[in-house]
Image (cartoon, coloured by chain):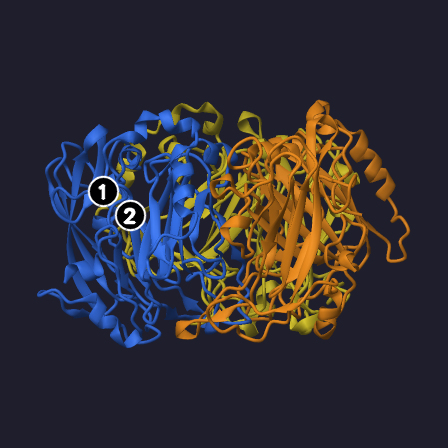
Chain colours: A yellow, B orange, C blue
Amino acid sequence: MEDNVVSRSGQHHLPRRNLLAAAGVLGLTAGAVTVATTTKSQPARAAAGVIKKVTVYAEALPGGLLGYGLAPGTATIPGPILEMYEGDTLEITLVNTTTQRLSIHPHGVDYSTGSDGAPLNASFNEPGETRTYVWRSHEMTATAGRRFMPGSAGYWHYHDHANGTDHGTGGLNKGLYGALVVRRRGDILPDKQFTVVFMDMMINHKVAPDTPMFEADLGQRTEWIAIGHGNLFHTFHLHAHRWADNRTGMLEGPSDPSLVIDNKDLNPGSSFGFQVLAGEAVGPGAWMYHCHVQLHSDTGMSGLFLVRNADGTMPAGAQEAIDRFRGHQHKAAATAKAQAHVHGGTGS
Amino acid sequence: MEDNVVSRSGQHHLPRRNLLAAAGVLGLTAGAVTVATTTKSQPARAAAGVIKKVTVYAEALPGGLLGYGLAPGTATIPGPILEMYEGDTLEITLVNTTTQRLSIHPHGVDYSTGSDGAPLNASFNEPGETRTYVWRSHEMTATAGRRFMPGSAGYWHYHDHANGTDHGTGGLNKGLYGALVVRRRGDILPDKQFTVVFMDMMINHKVAPDTPMFEADLGQRTEWIAIGHGNLFHTFHLHAHRWADNRTGMLEGPSDPSLVIDNKDLNPGSSFGFQVLAGEAVGPGAWMYHCHVQLHSDTGMSGLFLVRNADGTMPAGAQEAIDRFRGHQHKAAATAKAQAHVHGGTGS
Amino acid sequence: MEDNVVSRSGQHHLPRRNLLAAAGVLGLTAGAVTVATTTKSQPARAAAGVIKKVTVYAEALPGGLLGYGLAPGTATIPGPILEMYEGDTLEITLVNTTTQRLSIHPHGVDYSTGSDGAPLNASFNEPGETRTYVWRSHEMTATAGRRFMPGSAGYWHYHDHANGTDHGTGGLNKGLYGALVVRRRGDILPDKQFTVVFMDMMINHKVAPDTPMFEADLGQRTEWIAIGHGNLFHTFHLHAHRWADNRTGMLEGPSDPSLVIDNKDLNPGSSFGFQVLAGEAVGPGAWMYHCHVQLHSDTGMSGLFLVRNADGTMPAGAQEAIDRFRGHQHKAAATAKAQAHVHGGTGS
């Protein structure tokens, strides 16, 4: 049941369902109870929030790296995609199996100081320690002037905030980061999900040609969650697909003024997400995604989005493109840092 | 009266009032008259603009710094928050008490070339000179196709554009910058306002632990005005709070497609603002705001947002967090540049 | 006829027309036929798309530079503004008159792998080779939950993706880039168009005072298309004018939540556009546009927007401002790289 809401990287995909089915998608654990949101104002509509208990393991990985996983021995870089609906609560029990101080700090959701994940608030795991962090969420709430204080829905992320420095720089450098999705009830669910983290000169801690190849069949609804970390500025570009620069990546209708883009700044601490229909209006093939800072793409911040034919077969020319990608020279391919034996990103 | 619209840094706070009371908030000076906006098209609705006369003093501060203030001897870095409603005019009489050429250049509002503040248009104060700059504003105006040319409302800023170089680089480096808020009639007024300027490796010309600690009681409506300057890229992150990435930081309702964020690019010349209810959905405590570029946060671009209990008392654990913040090592704490004896930012 | 839709840099300006006249603006070539869009879902409304055939010449320019042009011997940096309406197709026949491998890769529009312009998909022109790239476009399409997958409308751009490196870094460094505008039917057409490309420390491959001076008469509707390239981060600032940070730069009405800005990040691979009425609410004069990163503006990333009087005469003080601009010291004026004898940008 737990995997329905907190999917392992690329192993479980949320089925596409409509609003009415949403509660069923969440799945209630044995101990879950319906909770009211803690916002001070009246929620715009009643939230049928659930409490979801999840155990996360912080583990050492080869090459001096660290990762988060949902079971012992399964840590990945990036970590698993965590999901909730507005109104839900995630109780994250973080098991620190390493010999280092670390934590888990979320963006976007609600937490008290004890769940901040920051040394400032004495919120972290000592080596070997197990600690529970509580992430709540809420729907938008009406305020004065016919305006609404925003709810928690968004394409967020989580990361260490205690390893190496008080801002978690060591933990980030070692791989302690992942995606956190908070949906509004009624949001369209994807067929597939991909996490893409741009950090320093790497994608998901790898450089081309070892960056993840994300795959989908023509027409599948794919959800991309893009996260920035580190010290450099980046721009995320996806070939042959485009999205609205708003909360969902889709338009609300002709009067939705949102920019439509295919390239977006992806800087440290920021994240965004969108859904595209694989190959919509362009057809199948091997499409590049890459950082559009030229030096970065030239030295390895590039990967492939393989859109297969609708029946799952390989489209003409795609294998040749993949071979070219794997064979062509990336100046940074020698960068040993990212070559460690790590599970390969969050796509499938 | 003047202080009602042009508040000294953190000393006067705009009371929360509704639309009908807005004209009263502005306060008319003796010489003020109601002016029509100068836009060429018809305004969407009649603007009851006022002319507001303000004297600003540019002064030398210890350590070779410069600041703007609303009375002699009161200059701060950043300068005072200047405010107006769409349709209003601010007549800024800038008294240059220094021995250097300088100016005041606004973003967002309307000005003729003589008030550009740029040497290009011979618009600056010689040493010791007094000069008046006129900043007008206007409401949105209907144009073809049921669209509207935007009005002036926004979270803007002002800065020197003549000191050191023709782009005011010297003045910025010395501290000549501040926030400018243009409201649309009906906008919700805050209880408290904070200006946060990210520039080079500093916040409001300081590095941690000397960065401003902004304070509010649980539930107070706080308004943050974030401004970027200098030569580096930054991302502004606030713990445990979030806002809509639009004009007000709030949603217009369920069909408002705006992204909800807690981390945003804050690069030179850009500014944005938002309102959050202190501790909404998370409770009181000491919450960090910081640049999310890891090297920047690790070396001093970090500060505290202290959310007190609703009755103004200190929440449990907050003093310990403050003590940790002040005591913990910030590599850049040795940076002498920002240690000068300057009034401490724009928060209270 | 062709020039109506594919205007040479600053030589042809689209007349301001309403929706009903839009089809006439496009102009049908002899071989053009009405095509249905290729999107899988139902378009929101019927698209009367046309196929437009355009020949583009990639040519060597003095100083080792390269440019795109619409006729032999007319290449410019940036290249010509290419335009289409949602639903239209552009068939770009690229004639490579150079001795180097190169291509043309668009952002925002629809193309199959053969028109990707990337070596990954074997999509490029060998030296001397002529090759046709097909760029399609589509309107928004309804999807689940009353949402719409975005259409192609946007202020996009095109650039080489095969010269120097597999990401076209060599081609970009030499000048192979330009603007691509896809309009939604009913969009307001401008009187004048300007392309502004921020790349490394240059604007349109030039440094001040040789950067383009864009000109318009007071009240003319000017369209700015801003594009970022290269390896550095930039922020685009325009004095005395402002726009909505959305698809058109204008507001849909009072409930449009868009930010209104006058400064925006302009990073590699990104583009945006907006329309301003020249001198609206501020009057005529010489107004600066520049990168707001201080070091960048100080060393030459600055130019002029000359707003003439409504009758086309020179406003008071403007010539003096221009003279100051041309005379004042720009540290980077010695940068030989950008001094080559290239046609001067895309404004008039």
Characterize the local packing of mark 1: few (<14), some (14-19) or many (20 or more) Cα atoms within 10 angstroms: many
Of B94 and A317, nearer the camera is B94
Query: Along the horizontal axis of the image, is B218 left or right of C248?
Result: right
Look at label 1 and name its amino acid.
Answer: Thr
- The numbered mark, 1 or 2, whose residue comes first in the sequence reads 1
Look at label 2 and name its amino acid.
Answer: Thr
Query: Along the horizontal axis of the image, is A323 left or right of B59?
Result: left
Q: Is residue A99 above or below residue B77?
A: above
Q: How far from the left and from the top, in percent, is residue A162?
A: 70, 35
Q: How far from the left and from the top, in percent, is residue B208?
A: 73, 33
Does the rendering let one see residue A339? yes
On the image, numbered disc 1 is attached to which residue?
C76
Query: Along the horizontal axis of the image, is B317 left or right of A20?
Result: right
Q: Residue at x 43, y 24 (%)?
A: A335
Q: Secondary structure at mark 1?
A: loop
On the image, numbered disc 2 is attached to which residue?
C346
The N terminus of chain B sits in image quarter: bottom right
**Residue reaching furthest to the left:** C30
Q: How far from the left and from the top, in percent, is residue B269?
A: 54, 44
Q: Secondary structure at mark 2?
A: loop
Q: Chain of mark 2?
A: C
Q: Chain of mark 1?
A: C
Proximity of marks 1 and 2: CB atoms separated by less than 8 Å: yes
Characterize the local packing of mark 2: few (<14), some (14-19) or many (20 or more) Cα atoms within 10 angstroms: many
Real-space CA distance between mark 1 and mark 2, rounded to the nearest whole angstrom: 8 Å
Which corner quadrant of the image does residue B236 belong to? top right
Does the rendering let one see residue A213? no
Which numbered circle lies on residue C316? none
Of C15 and B60, nearer the camera is B60
Q: Residue at x 53, y 48 (%)?
A: B116
Q: Are marks 1 and 2 on the same chain?
A: yes
